[in-house]
Image (cartoon, grey):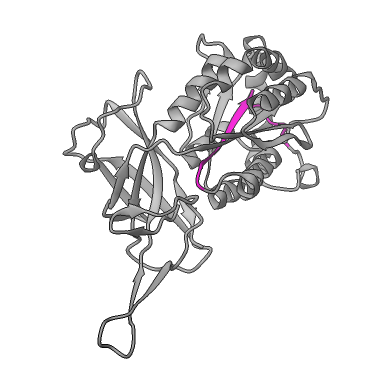
Amino acid sequence: MLQPEINGRRLDRQVLNRIMLSVGLLCAISAAGQDKPAVFQTTTELVLVDVQVLHSKTRTSTASLRPADLHLYEDGVRQEIRHFARDEAPLSVLLLFDLTDSVRGVLTKLAEGAVSALGHFKPEDVASVMVYAARVELVDGFTTDRERTVRAIGRAATMKSGEPAHFNEAIYRAARQLGESSNPLSRRVVIWLTDNLPNVPFRKSDSPPHTENEALRALNEEGVTVVPILMKNRMFLPMVELMMVFEAPWRKAYPPGDAHKYAEATGGIAMGLRGKRVDERLAAVIDDLRSRYTIGYRPSESKLAGTFCKLRVELAPDGALRPREWMVVARQGYYRK
């Protein structure tokens, strides 16, 4: 995420990967007694990274983080942290729902409790609803109208599909929808209700239009964070384990997508309900997203547009937090623009 900065003030907040290679500000000031105006030019480049630091056991976030507690690296080179804040940026949230049988019952419960869950949004936050099986359908576009979103969740809960579940296509389409339709000043998030059991193609011709790598690239290009809420049907766990063993060769040849992988790559956290109702979990996810830290740095070297830059954020060895007790969650990279 690129953000111009003058005299320490942020002028704009853009998605992580939408980095402008130069931001010029030209000011012409007439000086008394001079025939020509004096011209000043300032160009700055700031990459912004959202970071969350969680306790390893409780998964609760810390509210006492300092710049000295973190080290940030781009392509293995340590960067100087020039911006550090715990801001509450507006959210652009795409609610993505799997239409498989194991998710539908929980989706119905979410529809019943959606009013209370969406009450955790702020007035400037926007939400959209999308469902998928083999095909992806946008149920409702981005809006600040909470009643409209509640109705869209209710419609999604009544939808059924006997088609296979294509994760990569759903995530690709969700990322592009966020890139085209969301508030450019916001944190872009996919909150994904899924059983994390994609249908595996047994040959290339069975694969959906977009691959796992293409879906991951779309997420990084649009600066999207994926936060899966995982459903598990314990009755089917033995069958699932056998199926995973049988499908292993095809999963390796044609990766069908994985909720944990998408979350880890984009700085999200995959979580189950763990005794919570689905509307309570959704509300907690919204609150956690809003409370993240934002750190910024100026890249130490110029790179060609389209270059993927790897990011790593870790706790400083001499910081206040012990690495054994705390974990850092942040996206793993971005594409230069």
- 324 is higher (above) or lower (below) than 11: above
Does residue 100 appear in the picture of this structure? no
Q: Is residue 240 magenta?
A: no
Residue at image coords 66%, 44%? 177
Please state if 56 lies on the left or on the right of 262 as rendered.
left
Please state if 292 lies on the left or on the right of 234 as rendered.
left
Please state if 91 lies on the left or on the right of 317 as rendered.
right
- 325 is higher (above) or lower (below) than 304: above
Q: Position of residue 270 (x, y in %)?
A: 51, 27
The residue sitting at the right extreme is: 162
Residue at image coords 37%, 57%? 46
- Tell me where residue 8 sits by quadrant: bottom left
Q: Which stretch appears magenta?
A: 185-200
- Front residue of 46/79: it is 46
Q: Position of residue 58 (x, y in %)?
A: 36, 18
Residue at image coords 44%, 46%? 332
- 112 is higher (above) or lower (below) than 246: above
The residue sitting at the front extreme is: 32
